[in-house]
Image: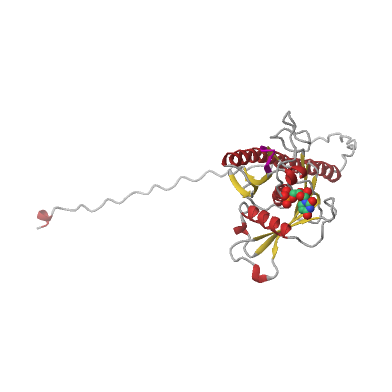
């Protein structure tokens, strides 16, 4: 919800109310695999935002008539907890929540290899525990790593952040007051591996130059967030590898029987080796000389003419 931009949100030194520079992100941390029962999960903290993403599937879709014959359906359920904002939020799903669920679902569909799982659903639950502006972007960032945690093949991760207009200046990563009182909001989802924009929305009035500047700043911010996503995934697998190697070492210890000290084997005094007497080999009787066989002389064959 963009405001009229009249509230002073940037001081004369160019610093924002929370002390950030115009191109600075809020502190971000991402934890992977935070839920035991989900196929994949992540928790993101972006400034004061706290959001949990849980992925279930690919699994059977009900009602069946919603299944897609050639690919999986990605269903997102973005919900703000009643206690996530100052004024209690109604637990009934609002139009805003439905819209955010849809845009996140569309963005994720553009990077997941949905064709690998026809006639199934991949369900992504996004629960906002604490909201501080930019929750759709933080949710998309968390959903992306939760899908990776679930082992769902993707063309690339999506990192997301909103740029915006505050006192006619383009700034990165709007937080609550800037979102409410600033004059423009531009949430962007960006996939650095594909160099593709998978989500872009706009609220407020931007000049073309401001729009381009804001889009580029958001892409730069998303690229920084992408590094944090990668690091979170790498940390998780490094931890698993360390755990597995400890387990393997312990199992090896258990399986290997302790080498008992070898009993001293006294060498028996060697008995003289009895050599069996060789059997007497009798000399073969000399073969008698064969009688000389005299060849009988062949009858002389006379020439044909002589015979005549
Ligand atoms: N907000 C609120 N109550 C609501 C919805 C939103 O207080 O019912 C606040 C919340 O802090 C949220 C911010 O308004 O982060 C901006 O909401 P917007 O619709 O712009 O979405 P977001 O910026 O969170 O993606």
Q: Residue at x 61, y 65 (%)?
A: 68
| Residue 127 in sight from this viewpoint | no
Q: Residue at x 82, y 59 (%)?
A: 90
Percent across and percent down for residue 27 are 77, 38
What segment is highlighted magenta in the picture?
162-170
Judge left or right: residue 260 versus residue 120: right
- Taking depth in this image into account, of 186 and 166 the one nearest to the observer is 166
Quarter location, residue 7: top right
Quarter location, residue 121: bottom right
Percent across and percent down for residue 119 are 64, 65
Residue furthest to the front in view is: 6
Queried whether the magenta region covers residue 50, the answer comes back as no
* Total labels drawn: 0
**Coloring applied to the structure:** secondary structure
| Residue 267 in sight from this viewpoint | yes
Percent across and percent down for residue 134 are 73, 46
Judge left or right: residue 79 versus residue 160: right
Judge left or right: residue 171 versus residue 283: right
Q: Residue at x 89, y 39 (%)?
A: 260
Image quarter hosting the C terminus: bottom left
- Taking depth in this image into account, of 27 and 144 the one nearest to the observer is 27
Q: Is residue 99 above or below residue 167?
A: below
Q: Is residue 265 above or below residue 114?
A: above
Quarter location, residue 92: bottom right
- Taking depth in this image into account, of 231 and 236 the one nearest to the observer is 231
Q: Residue at x 12, y 57 (%)?
A: 307
- Magenta-colored segment: predominant secondary structure: strand
Residue furthest to the top in view is: 13
- Taking depth in this image into account, of 118 and 83 the one nearest to the observer is 83
Percent across and percent down for residue 93 are 76, 61
């Amino acid at each position: 919800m963009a405001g009229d931009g009249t509230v002073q949100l940037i001081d004369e030194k160019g610093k924002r109310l929370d002390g950030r520079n115009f191109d600075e992100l809020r502190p971000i941390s991402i934890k992977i695999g935070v839920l035991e029962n989900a196929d994949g999960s992540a928790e993101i903290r972006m400034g004061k935002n706290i959001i949990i993403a849980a992925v279930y599937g690919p699994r059977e879709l009900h009602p069946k008539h919603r299944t897609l014959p050639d690919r999986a359906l990605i269903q997102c359920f973005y919900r703000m907890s009643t206690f996530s904002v100052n004024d209690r939020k109604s637990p009934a799903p609002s139009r805003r929540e439905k819209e955010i669920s849809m845009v996140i679902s569309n963005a994720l569909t553009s990077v997941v290899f949905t064709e690998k799982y026809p006639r199934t659903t991949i369900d992504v639950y996004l629960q906002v525990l604490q909201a501080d502006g930019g929750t759709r972007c933080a949710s998309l960032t968390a959903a992306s790593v939760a899908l990776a945690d679930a082992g769902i093949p993707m063309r690339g991760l999506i990192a997301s952040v909103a740029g915006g207009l505050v006192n006619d200046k383009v700034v990165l990563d709007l937080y609550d007051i800037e979102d409410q009182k600033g004059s423009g909001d531009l949430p962007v989802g960006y996939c650095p591996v594909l160099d593709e924009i998978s989500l872009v929305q706009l609220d407020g009035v931007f000049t073309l130059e401001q729009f381009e500047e804001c889009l580029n700043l958001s892409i730069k911010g998303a690229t920084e967030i992408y590094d944090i996503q990668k690091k979170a995934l790498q940390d998780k697998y490094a931890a698993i590898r360390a755990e597995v190697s400890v387990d393997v070492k312990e199992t090896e210890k258990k399986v290997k029987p302790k080498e008992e000290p070898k009993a001293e084997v006294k060498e028996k005094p060697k008995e003289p080796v009895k050599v069996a007497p060789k059997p007497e080999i009798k000399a073969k009787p000399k073969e008698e000389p064969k009688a000389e066989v005299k060849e009988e002389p062949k009858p002389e064959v006379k020439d044909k003419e002589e015979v005549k």
